[in-house]
Amino acid sequence: MVLATPNPILRGEKIDSNIELPTIDLMGETKKVCKEIVKACEEFGFFKVINHGVPVDVISKMEEESLSFFSKSEAQKKQAGPANPYGYGSKTIGFNGDMGEVEYILLNTNPNTIALYSNTISNNNPTKFRCAVNWYIEAVKRLACEILDLMANGLSVSDTNFFSRLIKDSDNDSLFRLNHYPNTKDMDTSSPTPPPPMDVAHYKVGFGEHSDPQILTLLRSNDVGGLQISLEDKVWVPVPPDPFAFWVNVGDVLQALTNGRFLSVRHRALVTNNNNNNKTRMSMAYFAAPPLNAWVSAPKEVVTHEKPRLYRPFTWAEYKRTTYSLRLGDSRLNLFKSNT
């Protein structure tokens, strides 16, 4: 859920649109689904889920509220900010000088926090906004728990609620974020030949390269692209938009909980001046996190003689504090590696 300062996009960057990203049908046979999820998390740290069970009307109501807010004038939107850390923010991300071509609403998923901020985010009908957010969070939290249980099953963890219990806790520190990426207005359009899809020379970084510090992220966007994930060999893979599916990001905490078997995916979002229409990218992200005092320590099933404990036990509060003390594109997990 964090942003790095957007460096200029270089023509020399490797972009590969031919890599097929994993799609997992949650209606499939459980054993097969568990195996596919583990493989996707080990190879990409990222996958798409279909037949996810989140009701269409819950998604559409949340999207409607998001569109309504971001369609307001700048002065009206600023009444819901500045984000400190919750509320409305634009361009300035966090407290360490990180920037992005993005505007957003950030909320803690605690219903009391949502009720408090609903009054400034939607002063015309705060109840409608609050209900849309609560319904959406309830649905995606349920989906996140299902996916985490399938992960535990696939890793042969005897307690299949080992991961999901952390976000089921009423004191969980999960976040919800609505993102809007306005089209850029100052790109070079002098070339007589339109650039090929995702020609990075014609794009700006809207959401800088980073990994999410939490357990996992459930991301849903409209039908405008821009998201990319980074592979280990620094190849960027464009993620095709699919408004009917959810993308799952492995976060830093899940990498630690799986003793490094799952990869915390680095990703970014690009912004362009869409010449075909004025539609802009909008996304909703649920960041599943444990309570602040929860210990992050891999279960015994993923710690072996051949693969000893990679990270020392730490609390989410400690990791979160470290995360926000760094430039947010920095590697953080290396600071928590075990000395044994």
Image (spheres, rainbow, N blue to C red):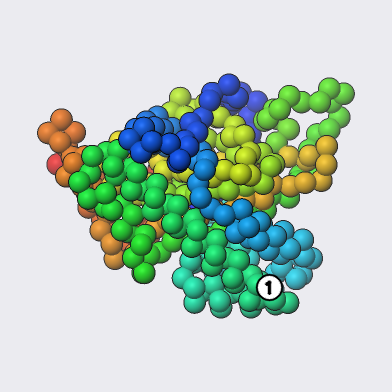
Question: Which is more toward the observer, 117 or 244?
Answer: 244
Residue displayed at 25% across by 58% down: 295
Q: Amino acid at mark 1?
A: Ser
- Residue 189: x and y in percent read 84, 33
Q: Secondary structure at mark 1?
A: loop
Would you say 99 lies left or right of 319 here? Answer: right
Question: Which is more toward the observer, 165 or 121?
Answer: 165
Residue tagged 1: 122
Residue displayed at 55% across by 61% down: 136
- Residue 20: x and y in percent read 53, 25
Image quarter for residue 223?
A: top right
Q: Residues within 10 Å of mark 1 (few under 14, many from 20)?
A: many
Examine the rendered structure and indicate whether residue 157 appears above or below residue 73.
above
Quadrant assignment for the C terminus:
top left
- Residue 125: x and y in percent read 70, 76
User: Is residue 101 visible to the viewer in this orientation of the structure?
Assistant: no
User: Is residue 239 visible to the viewer in this orientation of the structure?
Assistant: yes
Residue displayed at 68% across by 63% down: 65
Would you say 229 lies left or right of 205 here? Answer: left
